[in-house]
Image: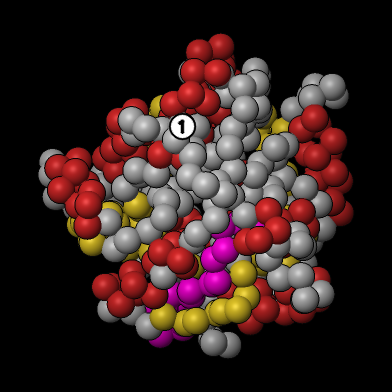
């Protein structure tokens, strides 16, 4: 593994992996709106790269119909428990000769028996090896090390970003020290330095994945979710991250340039009607009216030619536009595309959480 490394997300892609959303506890008893939001993401991705869409046998026909108009879309029959391709799919790494391999981490529904979000996750845990087999690439089994793809970002130049709140949580690798976890990340991802942000996005049920709060947009350059409102519970979390990032250097010894990417102006809350629309399985984490959802514009996704950015609409239209403007300035070589994402957020994550890049 020493010569394999995870490229930056903004490096060229061969394709993107996604999963057709059907779980009633995430997307509601009627997942039509969520599926329509996913289709918009499919369409944007296939403008510049291939799409592999996974669906279980019972939903295969619906998934095929949804992408029938997209010649770059390929539907595979692989079962899963939900649609979080970032977290259950393989993390792809390459070596100097250009060979591709997929890492299969142990998946335990974001915390297992401690604080996992559902009671059974065996099908999710089997997605990565099944997809690697379908793609015809070697699968590197990293079990028993527990990790989700949304909890890591890399710059492709030796640096990884993570959050302490997630990787040091009691439900993942409690028998390992921070130093042991860092060594495993360096070994598997081909990085030389891990940057440990203290916190993530407020009320993020993944124990605060890094992909919702901070992301590389270039070498030694990151965006950080931010708010100027000192009364917002996000303020202290982002301020702690900013202080850390301003004192850190990357694997090449470079100081980081940090660009603030403000969160939506108005918190997005789960309404009583939203809660009534779910159908939660026994042992599944539930939502309550008034619960704040972990909305962040940092949960965007790079394609070969674009940046796909969540848009929340309603009273957040001005902050939607602001996010697009900031990211267009930072990514001048790509088209920045805003996509309606309120119905994706309802499931607990956003555009980055439902996608997984396959490097070229």
* Residue 141 in view (yes/no): yes
Q: Is residue 224 left or right of residue 348?
A: right
Residue 162 location (% of width, % of height) = 69, 59
Task: Give how far across and how far down residue 286 sits, in percent.
Answer: 58, 37
Res 205 → quadrant: top right
301 lies left or right of 258: left
What span is colored magenta in the figure? Answer: 92-111
- x%, y% of residue 219? 62, 58
**On screen, residue 180 above or below 211:** below
**Which residue is painted at 46% across and 66% down in the image?**
122
Residue 123 picture quarter:
bottom left
* Residue at position x 49%, y 18% in the image: 273
- Residue 103 belongs to magenta span: yes
**Does 69 appear above or below 15?**
above
In front here: 264 or 60?
A: 60
69, 128: nearer the viewer: 128
* Coloring scheme used: secondary structure
Q: Residues within 10 Å of mark 1 (few under 14, many from 20)?
A: many
From the viewer's perspective, is residue 126 above or below residue 140? above
**Which residue: 56% across, 19% down?**
271
Q: Is residue 269 visible?
A: no
Q: Which x, y percent locates residue 167?
A: 72, 62
Mark 1: secondary structure: loop
Where, quadrant-wise, is the C terminus in this rendering? bottom left
Q: Quadrant of the N terminus?
A: bottom right
Residue that carries the numbered disc 1 in the rendered image: 278
């Amino acid at each position: 593994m020493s010569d394999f490394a995870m490229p930056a997300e903004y490096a060229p892609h061969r394709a993107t992996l996604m999963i057709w959303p059907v779980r009633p506890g995430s997307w509601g008893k009627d997942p039509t709106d969520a599926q329509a939001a996913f289709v918009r993401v499919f369409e944007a991705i296939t403008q510049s790269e291939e799409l592999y869409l996974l669906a279980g046998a019972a939903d295969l026909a619906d998934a095929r119909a949804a992408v029938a108009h997209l010649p770059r879309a390929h539907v595979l029959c692989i079962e899963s428990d939900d649609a979080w391709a970032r977290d259950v799919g393989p993390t792809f790494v390459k070596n100097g000769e250009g060979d591709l391999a997929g890492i299969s981490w142990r998946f335990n529904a974001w915390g297992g028996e401690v604080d996992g979000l559902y009671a059974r996750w065996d099908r999710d845990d089997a997605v990565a090896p099944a997809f690697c087999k379908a793609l015809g690439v070697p699968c590197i089994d990293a079990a028993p090390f527990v990790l989700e793809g949304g909890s890591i970002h890399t710059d492709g130049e030796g640096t990884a970003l993570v959050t302490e709140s997630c990787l040091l949580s009691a439900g993942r690798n409690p028998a390992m020290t921070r130093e042991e976890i860092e060594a495993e990340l360096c070994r598997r991802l081909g990085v030389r330095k891990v940057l440990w942000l203290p916190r993530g996005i407020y009320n993020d049920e993944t124990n605060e994945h890094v992909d919702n709060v901070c992301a590389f947009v270039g070498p030694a350059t990151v965006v950080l979710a931010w708010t100027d409102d000192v009364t917002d519970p996000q303020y202290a979390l982002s301020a702690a991250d900013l202080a850390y990032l301003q004192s850190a250097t990357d694997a090449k010894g470079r100081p980081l340039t940090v660009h603030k990417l403000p969160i939506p102006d108005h918190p997005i809350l789960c309404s009583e009607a939203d809660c009534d629309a779910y159908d939660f399985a026994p042992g599944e984490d539930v939502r309550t009216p008034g619960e704040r959802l972990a909305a962040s514009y940092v949960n965007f996704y790079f394609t070969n030619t674009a940046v796909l950015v969540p848009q929340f609409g309603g009273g957040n239209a001005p902050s939607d536009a602001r996010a697009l403007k900031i990211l267009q300035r930072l990514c001048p070589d790509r088209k920045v595309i805003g996509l309606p994402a309120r119905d994706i957020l309802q499931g607990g994550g956003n555009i980055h959480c439902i996608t997984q890049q396959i490097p070229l």
